[in-house]
């Protein structure tokens, strides 16, 4: 008991609230605009190496060239392949909202048809027995009126059979 | 041609989950005084003292200002560094730059963390893209679970191999008085642990620890004068990776920063058989599948061979190529300190001063690695001799 009292005297509990704005930039802004207005997932292409980025990048990491040319944008998906995945079975504090994660929570690392790099998003399927590597999925969009121009305009990826 | 650099003093605190009666400065002071005693030097001999940790983890930004009295940095040149999981190895490398450049003869570098004072997962999540990654990549574990699944898919590695790695690590940590989790676990014990994020269960993830490490580095002329058993920092490589998919080695031809680091370091030092030409590897292994997977990625063994080495027991403390004989990050993870501790433990193995967890084979050259951020890699080669 004595030890506990002593310990209480030598630490202070504190909480920090840190509100932020995040500027996504013109390229991601355009990606989100297309998602909101037309429900289309776009990739942009590097004029030097030809890789199609989804999510779009304004500069190619390898060539260091600008990839902002709008004519180089190509629609990808909405179907894709789950390259790999993870499943959270324990809740975590989310830094984006400060809320606890709702479990079970399955995230798919999705290679969209036509894209060269991956998009990560939640899977509709949360039964670990039913999530298979390389299974086919398709993006499910919110109704247009509810879309806000952020990544949550895609509700999740649902499993499809082809 | 840069000047040669040696490790001439090593100090580490004991590691634990909580140390309620010690504040961050006192923790550092503990490691600093142990390193000075090991080198038989005084703080006044140090020309520069530098420290690093993850600022957000203790909720205290630029903490070196308040810590100068404990670290001994007051009145001396140097800087504070934060590069995520690689803080520690970057501290060793920054110390190397300061001496290799010829500007200093004696430098102390410190890595530390007090994980019991904050929330790691929300803090660590802030390294990812806020708009698209942060809602889905849950801290470090999301990315590490992902690469583990991908590794199991491509190599044939099973959940049991992860459990074998953790069981081996527990045997090693049990022999290391400074390790945090020193309980011995069998493969069955590990398999029974609660699943956190498939395929990583609670025991296959590193703990959140607190602790500090200090290294004293010296120029060749100084080291030969003051130190009986200098350990030479023969070479080191730092590699950043392309953010977004490539950090998982997913999408196109598989390429990771670990692969680039291994390839550069071995080529430059004419090492063709890493498991013979280096005798021990203190790897930054924050999850169970890291050891088999990264043995392959660092190009130490062939693709899909890593888990077979685990199965054979080759990577155990008494094995033909011991990996993380201290118990590794799997048993002790005080992040800002973890990667410097890898360098310290590898140096102790070369000196023959690792005590109970000294490996059985003779160590002439050792590897140490750091890992963090978006798969940013550090790989260091330490040697008993200057040749």
Image: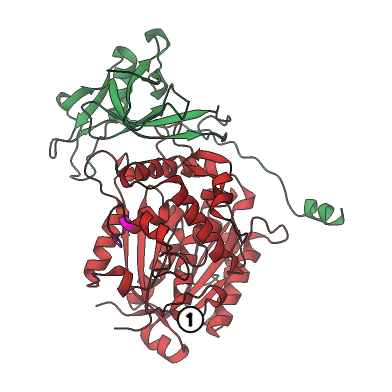
Chain colours: A green, B red
Q: Is residue B90 left or right of residue B116?
A: left
Magenta residues, dominant SS class: loop
User: What chain does badge 1 belong to?
Assistant: B
Q: Is residue B299 magenta?
A: yes
Secondary structure of residue under mark 1: loop
User: Does B26 sit above or below residue B137?
Assistant: below
Q: Residue at x 87, y 53 (%)?
A: A1
User: Does B187 sit above or below residue B236?
Assistant: above
Q: Nearer the viewer, residue B97 or B375?
A: B375
Residue B332 in percent (x, y) is at 55, 59
Residue B48 in percent (x, y) is at 47, 73
Q: For residue A71, what is the image quadrant?
A: top left
Q: Which residues are magenta?
A: B296-301
Q: Is residue A75 left or right of residue B64?
A: left
Q: Is residue B288 magenta?
A: no
Q: Nearer the viewer, residue B362 or A79?
A: B362
Q: Which residue is mark 1?
A: B352
Q: For residue B195, what is the image quadrant?
A: top right
Q: Nearer the viewer, residue B145 or B48?
A: B145
Specify whether residue B205 is in view. no
Crowd rating for badge 1 (residues with CA inside 10 Å; few <14, some 14–19, many 20+): some
Question: Most extreme residue toward the left, as rendered?
Answer: A48
Q: Quadrant of the N terminus of chain B?
A: bottom left
Q: Residue at x 24, y 44 (%)?
A: A61
Q: Quadrant of the C terminus of chain B?
A: bottom left
Residue B39 in percent (x, y) is at 53, 83
User: Does B217 sit above or below residue A116?
Assistant: below
């Amino acid at each position: 008991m004595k030890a506990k009292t002593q310990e209480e005297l030598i630490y202070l509990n504190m909480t920090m609230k840190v509100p932020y704005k995040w500027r996504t930039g013109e390229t991601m802004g355009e990606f989100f605009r297309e998602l909101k207005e037309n429900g289309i997932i776009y990739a942009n292409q590097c004029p030097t190496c030809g890789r199609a980025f989804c999510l779009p990048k304004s500069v190619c990491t390898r060539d260091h060239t600008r990839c902002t040319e709008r004519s180089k944008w190509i629609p990808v998906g909405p179907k894709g392949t789950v390259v790999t995945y993870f499943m959270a079975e324990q809740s975590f504090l989310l830094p984006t909202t400060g809320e606890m994660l709702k479990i079970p929570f399955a995230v798919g690392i999705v290679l969209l048809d036509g894209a060269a790099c991956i998009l990560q998003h939640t899977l509709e399927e949360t039964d670990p027995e039913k999530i298979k590597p390389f299974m086919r999925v398709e993006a499910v969009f919110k109704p247009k009126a509810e879309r806000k121009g952020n990544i949550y305009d895609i509700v999740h990826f649902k499993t499809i059979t082809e | 041609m840069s000047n040669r650099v040696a490790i001439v003093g090593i100090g580490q605190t004991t590691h634990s989950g909580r140390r309620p009666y010690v504040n961050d400065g006192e923790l550092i002071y503990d490691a600093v005084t142990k390193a000075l005693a090991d080198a038989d030097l005084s703080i006044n001999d140090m020309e520069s003292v530098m420290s690093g940790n993850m600022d957000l983890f203790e909720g205290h930004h630029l903490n070196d200002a308040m810590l100068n009295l404990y670290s001994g940095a007051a009145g001396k040149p140097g800087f504070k560094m934060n590069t995520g999981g690689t803080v520690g190895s970057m501290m060793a490398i920054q110390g190397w730059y300061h001496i290799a450049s010829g500007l200093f003869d004696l430098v102390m570098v410190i890595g530390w963390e007090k994980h019991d004072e904050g929330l790691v997962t929300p803090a660590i999540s802030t390294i990812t893209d806020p708009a698209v990654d942060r809602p889905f990549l849950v801290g470090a574990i999301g990315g590490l679970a992902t690469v583990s699944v991908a590794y199991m898919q491509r190599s044939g590695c099973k959940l049991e191999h992860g459990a074998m790695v953790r069981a081996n690590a527990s045997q090693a940590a049990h022999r290391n008085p400074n390790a945090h989790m020193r309980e011995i676990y069998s493969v069955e014990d590990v398999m029974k642990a609660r699943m956190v994020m498939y395929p990583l269960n609670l025991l296959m993830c590193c703990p959140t620890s607190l602790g500090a490490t200090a290294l004293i580095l010296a120029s060749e002329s100084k080291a030969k004068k003051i130190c009986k058993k200098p350990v030479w920092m023969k070479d080191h490589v730092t590699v950043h990776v392309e953010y977004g998919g490539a950090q998982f080695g997913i999408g196109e031809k598989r390429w990771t920063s670990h692969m680039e680091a291994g390839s550069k370091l071995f080529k430059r030092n004419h090492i063709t058989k890493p498991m013979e030409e280096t005798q021990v590897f203190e790897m930054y292994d924050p999850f169970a599948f890291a050891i088999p997977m990264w043995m392959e990625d660092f190009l130490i063994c062939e693709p899909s061979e890593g888990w077979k080495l685990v199965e054979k027991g080759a990577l155990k403390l008494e094995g033909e190529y011991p990996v993380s004989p201290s118990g590794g990050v799997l048993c002790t993870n005080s992040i800002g300190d973890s990667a410097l501790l890898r360098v310290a433990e590898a140096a102790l193995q070369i000196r023959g001063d690792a005590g109970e967890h000294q490996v059985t084979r003779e160590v002439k050259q050792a590897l140490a690695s750091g890992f963090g951020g978006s798969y940013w890699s550090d790989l260091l080669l330490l040697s008993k001799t200057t040749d």
